[in-house]
Image (cartoon, grey):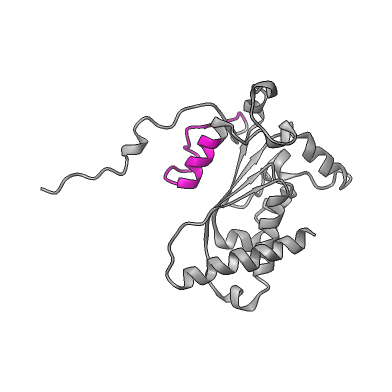
């Protein structure tokens, strides 16, 4: 069934993007994949590369975000053949992970623990693809009381919905005006990786595109 929907994404999504860009469309297209949605995005790009006409076209998507992604952490490695088509066509992939996501622990258990999920453990630390950045949400997640939060489904797997801090980080990611390592809602963990924090946007960010008046 996931393959069926991945092919629909190729037909009704990627093909439309490719044809529009071939005709001069310059609109930025972003892809967000929650849970199995991450798999659908990855597989759709892989399937698109098997189509002769799409394989020859230089179609582009801007930002890709995996949110609680139910794909293997190893698929975000630089040497993963499966994710290569996605990285070839995307500007950047941001993987939001949460080590307390027990829903993804169940998904991993179905694979006998041999394929940890990217949405739970993050991207590989040693050989992550250079276009992939992992943002660990665990420390921030621990501060949230589910009774005071808006969410759909299981809290640990869908707390992102309606969360102001996550929305702020995602918004700055999609606008891509700030380097992925300098987004204000991120801080460095002791091991050098990035984690989500509650912080405001840079105070004067809205004015950074201001230009001086002629003369």
Tell me where the magenta segment starts and ends, as one range: 167-190
Q: Is residue 198 magenta?
A: no
Q: Quadrant of residue 187?
A: top right
- Where residue 21 appears, x then y in whole percent? 48, 68
- Where residue 53 appears, x then y in whole percent? 60, 78
Look at 69% across and 21% down and name the residue there.
147
- Where residue 131 appears, x then y in whole percent? 56, 52
Seen as rendered, the residue at the extreme left is 215
From this view, report whether residue 85 is shown above or below residue 154: below
From this view, report whether residue 52 is shown above or below residue 185: below
- Where residue 201 appears, x then y in whole percent? 43, 32
Is residue 79 visible in the rendered structure shown here? no
Q: Is residue 45 left or right of residue 117?
A: left
Look at 43% across and 63% down and name the residue there.
26
Between 2 and 73, the one lying in front of the other is 2
Between 189 and 145, the one lying in front of the other is 145
From this view, report whether residue 29 is shown above or below residue 187: below
Look at 62% across and 26% down and name the residue there.
140
Q: Quadrant of residue 43?
A: bottom right
Is residue 78 visible in the rendered structure shown here? yes
Q: Is residue 148 left or right of residue 90?
A: right
């Amino acid at each position: 069934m996931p393959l069926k929907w991945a092919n629909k994404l190729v037909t009704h999504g990627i093909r439309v993007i490719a044809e529009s860009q071939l005709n001069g469309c310059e609109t930025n297209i972003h892809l967000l994949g929650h849970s199995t949605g991450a798999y659908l995005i990855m597989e759709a790009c892989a399937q698109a590369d098997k189509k002769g006409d799409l394989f020859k076209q230089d179609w582009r998507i801007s930002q890709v975000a995996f949110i609680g992604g139910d794909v293997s952490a190893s698929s975000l490695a630089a040497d993963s053949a499966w994710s290569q088509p996605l990285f070839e066509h995307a500007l950047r992939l941001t993987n939001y992970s949460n080590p307390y996501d027990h829903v993804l622990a169940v998904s991993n258990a179905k694979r006998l623990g041999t394929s940890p999920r990217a949405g739970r453990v993050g991207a590989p630390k040693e050989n992550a693809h250079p276009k992939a950045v992992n943002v660990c949400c665990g420390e921030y997640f621990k501060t949230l009381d589910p009774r005071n939060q808006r969410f759909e489904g299981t809290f640990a797997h869908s707390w992102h919905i309606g969360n102001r801090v996550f929305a702020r980080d995602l918004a700055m990611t999609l606008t891509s005006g700030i380097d992925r390592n300098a987004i204000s809602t991120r801080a460095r963990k002791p091991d050098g990786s990035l984690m989500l924090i509650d912080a405001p946007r840079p105070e004067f960010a809205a004015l950074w595109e201001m230009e001086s008046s002629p003369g």
